[in-house]
Image: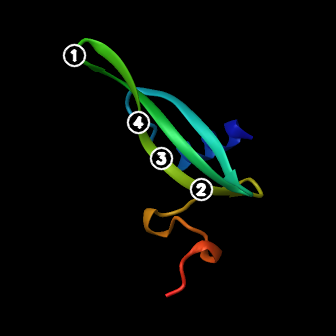
Amino acid sequence: MDFEIERLLFQQIDKPKNYLMTKIINVFHDYYRINVYTEIEEDGLIKRKISQSYLATFTNNVLNIIPENDKKPDDLKKKR
């Protein structure tokens, strides 16, 4: 399933320069945290860092990236 999520992610966003790997973590139910890692050379050292991070849902083979300002599902948002 991780390969399918990664494939769908890179259909929606550009793969970053110096891409290293993608780590996909199931947060709960059908919600996933997707971290995209890159390598950079700095001060003669190769450093690995998370260059992009997304919260997304994956249901019925459809990946839906949740916008930054809408990260929590409606049932978890505070009522005002």
**How busy is the neighbourhood of tag 3: few (under 14 within 10 Å), some, or many (20 plus)?**
some
Give amino acid for label 3.
Ser
Dot 1: element = loop
Would you say the residues marked 4 and 1 are in contact, meaning their CB atoms lie under 8 Å apart? no
Would you say the residues marked 4 and 3 are in contact, meaning their CB atoms lie under 8 Å apart? no
- What residue is shown at x 61% (from left), y 70% (from top)? 73
Give amino acid for label 2.
Ala
The foreground one among 17 and 39 is 39
18 relative position to 70: left or right: left
Q: CA distance from mark 4 to mark 3?
A: 12 Å
Circle 1 is placed at which residue position?
43
Q: Residue furthest top?
A: 44
75 relative position to 29: left or right: left
**Chosen colour scheme:** rainbow
Circle 3 is placed at which residue position?
53
- What residue is shown at x 58% (from left), y 48% (from top)? 33
* Nearer-N-terminus badge (4/3): 4
Q: CA distance from mark 4 to mark 2?
A: 18 Å
Would you say the residues marked 2 and 3 are in contact, meaning their CB atoms lie under 8 Å apart? no
Which label sits in the foreground, 1 or 2?
Answer: 1
